[in-house]
Image (cartoon, rainbow, N blue to C red):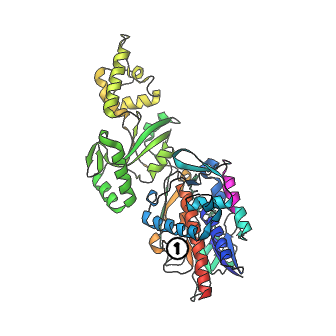
Amino acid sequence: MESIAIIGGGAAGLAGAVAAAQALRAAGCSDVEVALCEADERVGRSILATGNGRCNFSNASVRASDYRNAAFVGSVLQSLQGWSMRGGCTAGREAGVADPVHRFFADAGLLWREESEGRLYPQANKATSVLDVLRAKAARLGVRERTSKRAVRIDAPSAPEGPFAVRFDDGSVMRPRAVVLAMGGKHGLAVELPPLLRSGALSPVLGPLRSDGRLTRTLNNIRLKAVLCLCRPDEKAARNSIANDVELRSSALAAAAACGEDVGHADGGFRVTGEGLLLARQQGEVLFRDYGLSGIAVFNLSRFARPGDAVLVDALPGMGLAQAQEALGRRFEALMRDGAVLSGEDWGRGMLLPAVGALVLKQAGLSVSGPFAAADVPAFVRAAKALRFPVEGMADPAQCQVARGGLDIAAFDGRTLEARAIPGLFAAGEALDVDGPCGGYNLHWAWASGIVAGDAAVRKMVAGKEA
Ligand SMILES: Cc1cc2nc3c(=O)[nH]c(=O)nc-3n(C[C@H](O)[C@H](O)[C@H](O)COP(=O)(O)OP(=O)(O)OC[C@H]3O[C@@H](n4cnc5c(N)ncnc54)[C@H](O)[C@@H]3O)c2cc1C
């Protein structure tokens, strides 16, 4: 029996296997098997860990511009629309579900609900329900799960139309007609691939940032609702980075537009702050840890950060600089009505948590125990609206949600995800050099690219048989 091998039984691999099996059925091919080859002893374990076990499986609004390598992603998402129109997911379409990935899940029987910022979670609030519907659908379509099968080497066909050779760590060899690489990025793509496939270095992103422990240690475990700005002090380097990175450029432009006049000065659509060029801005919760900064807003900044950058934390969000100066000036007068001398600590009480107040005072050059005067208000407000934390790098790679890098997208056709130089070899998910922010975008990419690759692999094979 002929086969299609999907290497990696994570999100992209499962979606790819389902789409491939669906396409085989639609083409009436009963003599081809879809083999989902997974190194682990069970498929989908990586899905269970997502969204704190709840699996934020997608987002209500996904645009190609949300991703790194947006033009390539745009092409894949367009192909996905084509798949959906060809009848890839009838029930979802009939139910009026607009997004093809959401249709795919509606077809598989998943119910879901939308939470803040468009995050989609399964109705049952458990990642297992996402995995279960996919595995059940795959089983109904005849997908064969081959677990504890770690691919160690893949060789391209030695003759046109010949089979690939996939070698596993148990010594077995499989000879499929098509291969979909869906090994994710976390294991460093530790498979020997045909030499024509270029693979960049992998670096973990979407995780906590390491900062100066002397600043963050006193704040350990404090959560703060704040606005966070990522700035690059070396303005020339920042402009170079922007010129070479479309996603960074749009992040910097969006951040500048969202900041308004309060932060630094405008310069050709960008903003130059006292800490250099503004590259990214996030609103949300920051979680201080003894080693640095964590929380979703920080995870999102981490996609653009590098050592030497600075994160500015606005601890008084919701008030512009002038508004804060005025409001805190009035607050000072109100506190002085009692006639006592205020210390820095007294001034911070009721406004910020003591440890945060103490750091603001320190960065403003003021004392916690010494007297606090009306003339100190402007410096305090400036420091509170831009508490500075130097970026020393990513903190714990194990906490990072995606690995940036992987297979060079230039080697793949964005319409089919087939390797340009190796017909019959496809790739999907995190194995490719695509990543997005938190909020369901990375899983959405995994499903979307998995479907496109799995479907295209079968259509290519069927076309070859008919020729
Ligand atoms: C803690 C955590 C939480 C996350 N939460 C979210 C979230 O809520 N929403 C979101 O959108 N994204 C989230 N992500 C990111 C998301 O999990 C990934 O983007 C997504 O899983 C990538 O899917 P993939 O199929 O490409 O890779 P993976 O899910 O990593 O799957 C790859 C699979 O391939 C297998 N494999 C690897 N090498 C081989 C080999 N040589 N042979 C055979 N099999 C192999 C692996 O064992 C694995 O099962 C989270 C990530 C982490 C780490």
Q: Which residue is mark 1?
A: 416
- Work out which residue is located at the far top of the displayed protein and give it: 339
Q: Amino acid at mark 1?
A: Thr
Q: Residue at x 60, y 71 (%)?
A: 454
Specify start and end residues of the magenta stretch as a single range: 124-134
Q: Residues within 10 Å of mark 1 (few under 14, many from 20)?
A: many
Magenta stretch secondary structure, dominant: helix
Q: Where is residue 95 drawn, in percent x and y? A: 62, 58
Badge 1 marks a residue whose secondary structure is loop
Q: Nearer the viewer, residue 101 or 279?
A: 101
Residue drawn at x 34%, y 47% is 257
Q: Decide: is 457 above or below 450.
A: below
Can you tell me which quadrant of the image ligand 1 is in?
A: bottom right
Image quadrant containing the N terminus: bottom right
Seen at 41% across and 22% down, the residue is 345
Q: Nearer the viewer, residue 68 or 345?
A: 68
Q: Is residue 309 left or right of residue 142?
A: left
Q: Is residue 127 magenta?
A: yes
Q: Is residue 192 visible?
A: no
- Quarter of the image where the C terminus is located: bottom right
Q: Residue at x 67, y 79 (%)?
A: 3
